Amino acid sequence: MSEFSIGTLEETVLIILLMKEESHSVEVAQVYEKHVGQTISIPAIHVVLKRLEKKGLVKSRMGDPTPERGGKRKKIYQGTPQGYKVASDIQERRQQMWSEVPKPSLNYAII
């Protein structure tokens, strides 16, 4: 079991980073919107990425300058092996819990 406790938003952002080899914050926000169906601000993504990086679940580097950004460089993020382990542990615990949920019956009417 992992020693880290991460929130749902942190978990979602971590999984998004694990989906690709590397991403920048705008890409993370776009994938978040696609999969979650809600928008998220870039500053909110930055806060989450900093927390994940501080915990060692994500690492970053500065990308090359681009003309589209007026010569500015993007910060590129990627999940770490420890980040993968934490996300995998969460998935396993959830799967175990779901395996103990009774199949839908009169108690859980599907609407």
Image (cartoon, helix red, strand yellow):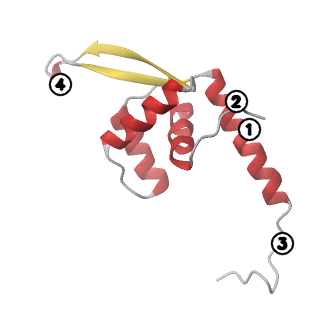
Q: In the rendered image, which quarter is residue 74 located in?
A: top left
**Can you tell which of label 3 and label 4 is closer to the viewer?**
3
Identity, as a three-letter code, of the amino acid under mark 4: Glu
Q: Is residue 64 above or below residue 40?
A: above
**Can you tell which of label 1 and label 3 is closer to the viewer?**
1
Are the residues at dot 1 and dot 4 in contact (C-beta closer than 8 Å)? no
Identity, as a three-letter code, of the amino acid under mark 3: Lys
Mark 4–mark 2 distance (CA, rounded to whole Å)? 36 Å
Are the residues at dot 2 and dot 3 in contact (C-beta closer than 8 Å)? no
Are the residues at dot 4 and dot 2 in contact (C-beta closer than 8 Å)? no
Residue 58 is situated, as x and y percent measured from the top left of the image, at 52, 25
Q: Secondary structure at mark 3?
A: loop
First in sequence: mark 1 or mark 4?
4
Mark carried by residue 85? 2
Q: Secondary structure at mark 2?
A: helix
Are the residues at dot 1 and dot 2 in contact (C-beta closer than 8 Å)? yes
Mark 1–mark 3 distance (CA, rounded to whole Å)? 24 Å
**Can you tell which of label 1 and label 4 is closer to the viewer?**
1
Q: State the residue lying farthest toward the left.
A: 70
Q: Residue at x 84, y 58 (%)?
A: 99
Task: Count neighbours of disc 3 (C-alpha within 10 A) and say few if under 14, some if 14 to 19, many if 20 or more.
Answer: few
Q: Quadrant of the C terminus?
A: bottom right
Nearer to us in this view, 44 or 30: 44
Mark carried by residue 103? 3
Residue 31 is situated, as x and y percent measured from the top left of the image, at 43, 44
Mark carried by residue 68? 4
Q: Mark 1 — residue?
A: 89
Mark 3–mark 4 distance (CA, rounded to whole Å)? 53 Å
Mark 1–mark 2 distance (CA, rounded to whole Å)? 6 Å
